[in-house]
Amino acid sequence: MQRRELETAAANYTYLRGLLYIPLGGLFVLAALGNWKVGPLRHNWVFLLVALALAAVAAAVNRYYNEVYGRLTPSTAQQVRAGIGLVLAVALMLGGATLLRSQASWSLDLPVNPIPVCFAVVMLVSYAIGVGLRAHHVIIWGALLVAGALPVWNGPDPSNIGLLLCGAAVIVCGVFDHRLFVHTFGPPRAIDYENGDVAAR
Amino acid sequence: MSQLAEELVLDRLIHEPGRLAILTVLSSVTDADFVFLLRATGLTKGNLSSHLSRLEDAGLVAIEKRFVRKKPNTNVALTAEGRRRIAAHWEQLERLKRLGK
């Protein structure tokens, strides 16, 4: 019996529910297309409607995981770590983007794409702390980091392309995370849920 | 039994692999439900149910039976005693491992 495997089951459960990342990635893509005002997305209400649809998909996916793989409440320490991580991630996204490329006086004004660079760093650090980096994390977020850091992003603000790249990376990472999740916790139909859980009788 | 041997005695209730797995998983969360424990430990429903009953009788876990979306849901959490005993058990196993080297 591997103690570490058992103790990290909760962290794996929280981080590797990859299907949740698909609507999240969709939100990045939607933001980019909305900024470009592509097709019906030139209307704000269409943007809001699609965002709500993505939120509904995320809620349905969350329910699927809860019913098929169970529910848990992370420990207080994990919740505090997640909260601090979120605050740092937002600070890094805002500060990093301004530092790399903006009109602020302290900006380095480099021809890089700050959104994918900062987002890739946030995701790499987040996975490294949460569940440990796996090969697909390094490849996907490493590729996003390199793509954003290449000094080829001259011209107008490349933020929208950055958002598209982030969205694609989130979706691909989600698919691989879900595969790993199923490998860790078993296929969906491995347990008979027909009569609810035995202990509840 | 010598003093050293007494000090190295393992908690038989906890040392059973299924119960050790359940308590170890629960030690890393605030609480978890029956389905998550099934998935995380790889035990069968019957085994998990009987182990949980024994652990509840010993006061190591607290079991709450409830309904979520009209479906029965069993939520399990370690008690303070359970948290103390599983930590002490793993410490004891580490001690034995060090002695064996």
Image: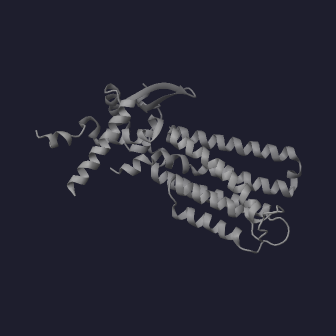
Q: Nearer the viewer, residue A27 or B60?
A: B60
Going by the image, does B48 lie left or right of A117? left
Does the rendering let one see residue A74?
no
Q: Is residue A71 above or below residue A21?
A: above
Instruction: Name the quarter where the N terminus of chain B is drawn.
Output: top left
- The residue shown at (65%, 52%) is A89
Residue at the spot 85% in from the left edge and 58% down from the top edge: A36
Q: Kindly give the residue lying farthest to the right in the view shown.
A: A43
The C terminus of chain B - image quarter:
bottom left
- Position of residue B50 relative to residue A48, above or below, is above
Taking depth in this image into account, of A103 and B25 the one nearest to the observer is A103
**Where on the picture, by quarter, is residue B23?**
top left
* Rendered location of residue B82, percent (x, y): 36, 33
Please give the count of numbered marks on the rendered protein: 0
Q: Residue A110's image quarter?
A: bottom right
Residue at the limit of the structure toward the left, as seen here? B1
In the drawing, does residue A187 fall left or right of residue A45? left
Picture layout, residue B35 above or below residue A177: above
The answer to whether residue A43 shows anywhere in this view is: yes
Image spot of residue A130 (x, y percent): 53, 52
Residue lying at 48% horizontally and 44% vertically, measured from the top left: A10
Q: Give left or right: position of B64 versus B43.
A: right
x then y, percent, for residue A32:
79, 57
Rendered location of residue B43, percent (x, y): 36, 41
